[in-house]
Amino acid sequence: MADKNEWGSNLSFILAMIGSAVGLGNIWRYPYVLYSNGGGAFYIPYIVAILLMGIPFLILEYGVGYNFKSSFAKAARKINSKCEYLGWFLPVAVFMIMIYYSAILGWDGIYIILSFFKGWGVNPDAFFATTLLHSSESYMGLLDFIPVIAVAMLAGWVIIWFISHRDLEAGLGKVSKILVPALFIIMVIIVIFSLTLPGASIGLAELFNPDWSLLGHFEIWMAAFGQIVFSLSLGMSIAFTYASYTRDDADLITNTISIALANSLFENFAALGVFSILGYMSLQSGTAVSELVTQGTGLVFVVYPTVFNVLGQWAYVLGPLFFLTVYLAGLTSILSTIEPLSFSIQNKFGLSRSKTMTILIIVGACISMIYATAFGGTLLGFVDTFINQIALLFGVIVECIIFAWIFKAEKLIDFLNSKTKTITLGKWWLLIVKYILPIFISIIWIGGMFDVAHSGSFDQLNFTIASAILLLVATLIFTILPAKNPDWDNAEERV
Ligand code: PHE
């Protein structure tokens, strides 16, 4: 029998990890990144980013997580007691993602229902911004509470609670085994259907049209590395936590390769679907693809409903399927964002998995209600930028240093190689994780900070500072609260 925090099988581990990686980033971010960074030519930096960063870094994160078989905060403390603060930083930052992801999930839940009768009406843009979100860029919007969104978000939290408060295998493990394959199957159906639409080839020609001259530009390399950090959920303490839940026989190198492949397969599939549909729209409306293409909420909640409006009867099939895919992709990702903090709390304070999850979910759901206000959409944009461009990349650098240097990545090589059925690690791996990665990610991080400092509005800067303070204070509280679990200082090592 697996214990409360152990996968029942390697398959559960792999599928849950794919579930975490395959998320909104694969559907609404990747197609746009590919298109706007050289199309076909983008594959070169993309593949380099996977081989040079994605796979080597995931192997490191898994290796250390597996070694400790305990939570991120507990392991960080064991590696060096001065690192405990850093050990709480990432789990708390990832929990902040959970809170705003729940808003997107809520919006999408509403769209699943609307898609059965094209309830967004003839002007999807105005519907999304005004009718649904009451979008307001002023703080006063916080006073305008939107019950429909609150209900949709709470429904999401109930589903999350239902899955997460159970033992790991009975909840997350089982659900991943059903939802992740379902997600891939629905995506395949959507893509096949989209490819048969008139005009699909127009979209695809635009998407893949390679602009080789961009290869010499620094930006597309940054974009590729940024996409891989986000898409593979690298360095977020999630991969670490999932690996710590594995049993003693895991081939972590081969698992990593499978997960990276599945993630890329899914996002490239999504890109085919998105651009075929944009090609169709371009043919119908005479608008150039370049004017239709966008990312994020604009793509999912505005461009897609606009396409469904002109698609006729098929929209009643494709619409619900599409919003369901987004929901499942979001759900399997959001489920991963609570694990690092939950496991760290269980370890330090001796609470059960079920109790910890229940408390965290109630706290998360209450805080998330701030997004069910007219200021919610604007706030979400600010927090998202802060977390993705600043906090997480900082976390990745920190993880790299703690794992590769303080823990010493060398210690893992013999163990990882003894289990592998595919590639074996050598000096090249150490060179990557100790030198190339921290330097590269630091460059992307500094670039992102400049971006926010230069192009952010005054409000955005204020909210970025407020989010940073909140994150740092919450992290501090977890660090200084006295441990209740006598085992807290006993992180066993497996390797
Ligand atoms: N990897 C997810 C995606 O591609 C995003 C994510 C980030 C998920 C952080 C969990 C935690 O959308």
Image: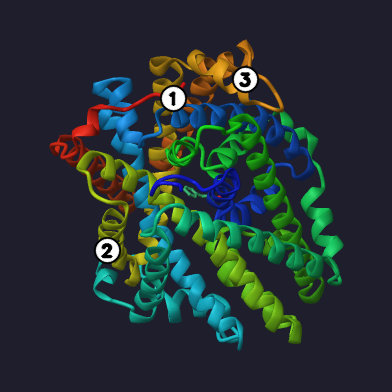
Q: Quadrant of residue 206?
A: bottom right
Residue that carries the numbered disc 2 in the rendered image: 362
Along the line of sight, the residue nearer the viewer: 425 or 94? 425
272 w.r.t. 323: above or below: above
Residue type highlighted by circle 2 = Ile
Q: Earlier in the sequence, mark 3 or mark 2?
A: 2
* Mark 2 surroundings within 10 Å by alpha-carbon count, few (fewer than 14), some (14 through 19), many (20 or more): some
**First in sequence: mark 3 or mark 1?**
3
- Determine which residue is flagged by label 3: 417
Question: Which residue lies under the disc numbered 1?
Answer: 494
Label 3 and label 2: CA atoms lie apart by 43 Å
- The relative height of residue 287 versus residue 341 in the rendered view (above or below) is below
Side of 259 relative to 345 (left or right)? right
Q: Amino acid at mark 1?
A: Arg
User: At numbered mark 2, what does the secondary structure look like: helix, strand or loop?
Assistant: helix
Q: Please identify, in this view, whether the residue under mark 3 or under mark 1 is nearer the observer.
A: 1
